[in-house]
Image (cartoon, grey):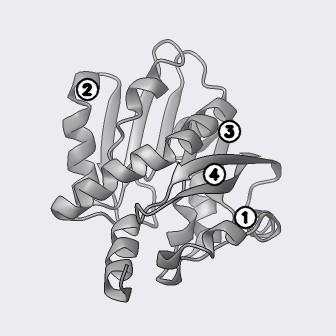
């Protein structure tokens, strides 16, 4: 792919827009589904809990999440108008259990201690002020809640050509240091490996990623 094509891909991975954004959303859901399922497994979702996903994309995975327990309520939040509309369209059937919120990317528009469980997959690269945003997550998480942050390792991500454009990459030590600067007190680190099709569509690659399970 040419430099300009890589820039467009990087921009749409951060904030999918328009018809191209819908395509990117479908591709992201397919390539991230393994990470998403591992994240929800780490959450240990139980009956009657309220779950927040930060950066839901097209949320084609919603059915799987709400089937993990009884009376689960899901809220998805995203900065992309395209993904907000696409997620609502794809998940009309779950209107009583799910809602989707569009926001500006730094302040979570919820009351303190709203959610039992919070998770996010492959969004941390785009956080402008990560410690402040971690503290926002801390604020809206219940005291006995769990936050799962899942991200691909820096060594892996650096090999992908599009990450040269507006991605901030982390290894485990850097991410743990970042979290230690926030209000969060406890975390458990777990590494995973999977085979995926690259986002440029040109090859199959081995992705190494981390699932951080974080507590107040």
Image location of residue 32, percent across then percent down: 50, 47
Image location of residue 94, percent across then percent down: 29, 24
Residue 86 is left or right of residue 158, and the answer is: left
Q: Earlier in the sequence, mark 3 or mark 1?
A: 3
Q: Earlier in the sequence, mark 4 or mark 2?
A: 2
Image location of residue 134, percent across then percent down: 62, 61
Q: Nearer the viewer, mark 3 or mark 4?
A: 4
Residue linked to disc 3:
146
Q: Is residue 38 above or below residue 137?
A: above
Q: Nearer the viewer, mark 4 or mark 1?
A: 4
Task: Give the spatial CA distance, label 4 vs label 2.
Answer: 27 Å
Q: Nearer the viewer, mark 4 or mark 2?
A: 4
Within 10 Å of the Cα at label 4, are there few (<14), some (14-19), or many (20+) other Cα atoms? Answer: many
Residue linked to disc 1:
182
Q: Could you tell me which secondary element the residue under label 4 belongs to?
A: strand
Residue linked to disc 4:
150
State the residue at coordinates (81%, 69%). Answer: 177
- Cβ–Cβ under 8 Å for marks 4 and 1: no
Task: Give the spatial CA distance, label 2 vs label 3.
Answer: 25 Å
- Cβ–Cβ under 8 Å for marks 2 and 3: no
């Amino acid at each position: 792919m040419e430099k300009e094509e890589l820039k467009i891909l990087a921009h749409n991975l951060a904030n999918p827009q328009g018809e191209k954004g819908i395509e990117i959303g479908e591709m992201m859901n397919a390539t991230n589904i393994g990470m998403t399922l591992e994240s929800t497994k780490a959450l240990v979702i139980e009956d009657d809990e309220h779950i927040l996903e930060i950066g839901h994309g097209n949320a084609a995975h919603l059915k799987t999440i709400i089937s993990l327990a009884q009376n689960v309520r899901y809220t998805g939040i995203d900065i992309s108008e395209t993904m907000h509309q696409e997620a609502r369209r794809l998940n009309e059937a779950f209107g009583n259990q799910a809602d989707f919120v569009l926001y500006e990317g730094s302040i979570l528009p919820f009351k303190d201690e709203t959610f039992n469980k919070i998770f996010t997959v492959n969004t941390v690269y785009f956080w402008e002020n990560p410690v402040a945003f971690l503290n926002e997550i801390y604020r809206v998480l219940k005291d006995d809640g769990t936050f799962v942050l899942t991200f691909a390792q820096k060594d892996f991500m650096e090999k992908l050509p599009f990450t040269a454009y507006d991605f901030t990459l982390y290894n485990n030590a850097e991410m743990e240091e970042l979290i230690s600067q926030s209000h969060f007190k406890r975390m458990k680190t777990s590494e995973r490996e999977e085979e995926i099709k690259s986002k440029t569509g040109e090859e199959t690659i081995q992705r190494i990623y981390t699932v951080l399970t974080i507590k107040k």
